Amino acid sequence: IETLLTEKDLAEEHLLVTAGPTREPFDPVRFITNYSSGKMGYAIATMARRRGATVTLISGPTQLPVPSGVRFLSVSSAREMRDAVMTTLPEATVVIKAAAVADYRPAVRQEQKMKKKDEDLTLKLERNPDIIQEIGKQKENRILVGFAMESEHLVEHAIGKMVAKNMDFIVANDVTKQGAGFQGDTNIITILDREGEMEELPLMDKMAAAGIILDKVREIRDTRRN
Ligand code: CTP
Ligand code: CA
């Protein structure tokens, strides 16, 4: 019913949305990850579909049901996510990178389950590819949206990321605030754009936050058309 009642104002867009954490294994049974629930990205995919967009959702492991009507690609590591994103990118007109991509992966993935020893263990980590940065280098007419989760200097860090990665706008949230962040159903977001505008939004449902993020996408598309 919601779908029938919603204006199809994104019908001309193909949104590529990434969501969830990545898993970086170091043996067959263990991995490094983070607390991302995937809720923000899934909310964006759901709302975009309701608004008529074609949606590809590329997701790391989450507990969430696949939103209906969405093309879904399941991935695990950052490198798998990168490959899936790059394969889909040519069709995408909007890219929203809500995934919490692990910055590092274990340098070695052991074939067999590691056995404990008496001494301490040091794991060497190596850098993962920065997916959104790669997209930023071949952005063309796409609208590129990133996220930043920060524990301090929210605005400075977020603007730095937006500029460095060639995003059109960035959605920043402060993990130290109650009601913001990875696990809950709510978020407290600040939207920063290339025009220097800053919109500090109150605590809201992730679905409502997704709606505002998509309004901003629509607004940028409209200004480019004129
Ligand atoms: N991102 C990405 N690929 C990575 C790391 C991050 O595409 N390997 C994207 C995220 O999906 C997000 C944006 O970059 O949209 C910012 O992620 P964040 O972790 O906040 O920033 P980093 O640049 O990784 O900086 P740091 O973790 O040091 O704060
Ligand atoms: Ca990071």
Image (cartoon, helix red, strand yellow):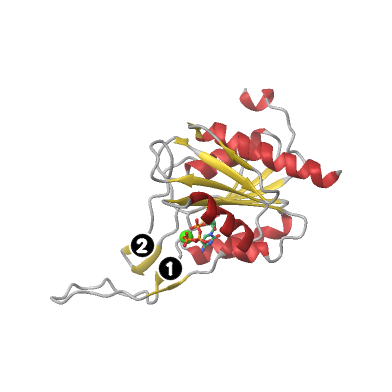
Please state if 172 lies on the left or on the right of 16 as rendered.
left
Left-right relation of 60 to 145: left
Quadrant housing residue 178: top left
The residue indicated by pointer 1 is 104
Image point (33%, 67%), residue name: 28
Residue 90: where, in percent of width, then height? 72, 60
Q: How many residues crowd around disc 2 within 10 Å: few (fewer than 14), some, or many (20 or more)?
A: some
Q: In which quarter of the view is residue 47 placed?
A: top right
Q: Which residue is disc 2 drawn over?
A: 32
Farthest-out residue, right: 226
Whether tag 2 and tag 1 are in contact, CB under 8 A, the answer is: yes
Per the image, label 1 sits on a secondary structure element best described as strand
- The quadrant in which the C terminus is found is top right
Q: Earlier in the sequence, mark 2 or mark 1?
A: 2
Eye-nearest disc, 2 or 1 = 1
Quick check: can you spot residue 166? yes
**Residue sitting nearer the eye, 122 or 163:** 163
Q: Determine whether the residue tagged by mark 2 lies in a helix, strand or loop.
A: strand
Image quadrant in which the N terminus is located:
top right
Q: Amino acid at mark 2?
A: Ile
Q: Amino acid at mark 1?
A: Tyr
At label 1, counting other C-alpha atoms closer than 10 Å, the crowd grade (few under 14, some 14-19, many 20 or more) is: some
Position of 221 with respect to 95 (left or right) is: right
Residue 151: image location, x then y, percent? 41, 51
The picture quadrant where one finds residue 51 is top right
Residue 84: image location, x then y, percent: 59, 61
